[in-house]
Amino acid sequence: MLSLDIELLRGEYRRQVRIEEQARVVALVGPSGAGKTSVLNAIAGLLRPVAGRIEIDGRVLFDAAARIDLPVHRRRIGYVFQDARLFPHLDVRANLRYGRHGDAARFSFDDIVGLLGIEGLLGRRPRHLSGGEAQRVAIGRALLSQPAILLFDEPLSALDRARREELIPYLQRVRDEVRLPMLYVSHREDEVRRIADAVHVVE
Amino acid sequence: MIGFTPEELTAIALSLKVALVAAVASLPAGVACGWLLARREFPGKALFDALLLMPLVMPPVVTGYVLLILLGNQGVIGAWLREHLGVQFAFRWTGAALACAVMGFPLMVRAIRLSIEATDRRLEAAAATLGAPPWRVFWTITLPLAWPGLVAGMVLAFAKALGEFGATITFVSNIPGETQTLSSAIYGLLQVPGGEAGIWRLTAVAFAISLVALLVSEWLVRRQRLRNER
């Protein structure tokens, strides 16, 4: 499903990252500073590798040799950032409706809102959401853009323990019900065990 | 009205028109330049930045003279515009607006640039991952978040235009009813005996307009902030 072999420039030196995974839900683990987020950014197109190739489900997003480098907005990525990154000037409903990747609507607005339990938040501004609520909205926003893959960058790390426990069941529901490939970056072993099918270690 | 002569009323109306047109018409270019400086790296950026600032540091008379050379009726661009498009800036109120726009441009670009630099690029990146092409990111994320800077830039340009004197009088002279703004009307009254009453009236008007402009901009910015905080 995910085939990635890239060379990233990190400061002075280059580093090679190779991932070949057939599993649908893959966790990327490794010590902080290992470049896990850089891998997600390279897949999303926010960071350009110096060389290599990125392919998801047979779709080539980047291939240095073939001079393929899809722009970010055409990659059909659903990226859930560590810091949610909701748009502060839009309410929750407008945030959820912001994304669009082509016309094929696989997920409906009401289904996703129900799946994540955010019906009661639709009229609110992001600054009036708790960390866990904001992260649920961010997941909904990513899903409603109709992505081909979901990227999670430590979505729980900004939350306290109780909020983390609250959010994990939602992540499991997303995993089980939307059936999309998922790449999940974390440095917490318990989280990874409860969410991923396979674990890939980035040294 | 309270003792205003028709000439004074004409100068006040013209000043408002010139300042408003200068501030509004230069906004698109101001946003474009502000965005370029805030978000793009390109060769010659430092020079571009310096050239944009020139009207702020050059003597206004020099700026006016440069405009006259370029856009005057005998000017390189001016002659062409007049002949082929029938557009004339020299000695017209549009020329006054142009001179004011040029003089206020550095202030406008600076305000817009700072507010675009202050908008969170991570939000723009998030919008791009959601499928928004660069133009949509700009219109729906960057511009709304930089809105207070746009308002501030327009107000600065408006205020600068209201007070502009040197470049305007050099480029379009001081023709009552066509290019005689508040400032040049006050200057004109200073040259003749017995003009004190008129000077006082126009000075009071200039004071009032500037105050209202500042209050309106504060109100616009605060309204936007409240809307964001709702």
Image (cartoon, grey):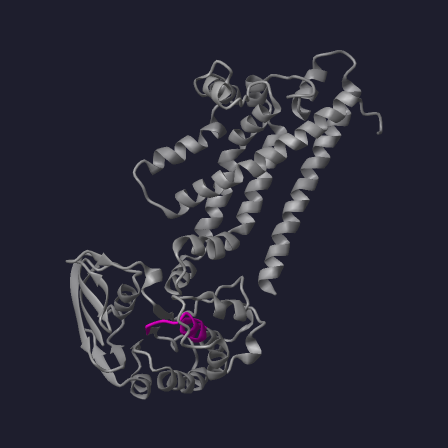
The vertical placement of B172 against A55, above or below, is above
Horizontal and vertical percent for residue A93?
Answer: 53, 70
> Residue shown at 16%/64% (left/top)?
A15
Report the front residue among A63 and B15: A63
A146 within the magenta span: yes
Horizontal and vertical percent for residue A51?
Answer: 17, 59
- Magenta region, residue range: A138-149
The vertical placement of B55 against B170, above or below, is below
Quadrant of the image containing the N terminus of chain B: top right
Indicate left or right for B60 with A139 as reference. right
Indicate left or right for B149 with A5 as reference. right
Horizontal and vertical percent for residue B137?
Answer: 43, 56
The vertical placement of B175 against A143, above or below, is above
Q: Residue furthest right?
A: B2
> Residue shown at 51%/43% (left/top)?
B111
The vertical placement of B153 against A9, above or below, is above
Quadrant of the image containing the C terminus of chain B: bottom right
Indicate left or right for B196 with A10 as reference. right
Horizontal and vertical percent for residue B4?
Answer: 81, 25
> Residue shown at 73%/25% (left/top)?
B10
A148 within the magenta span: yes
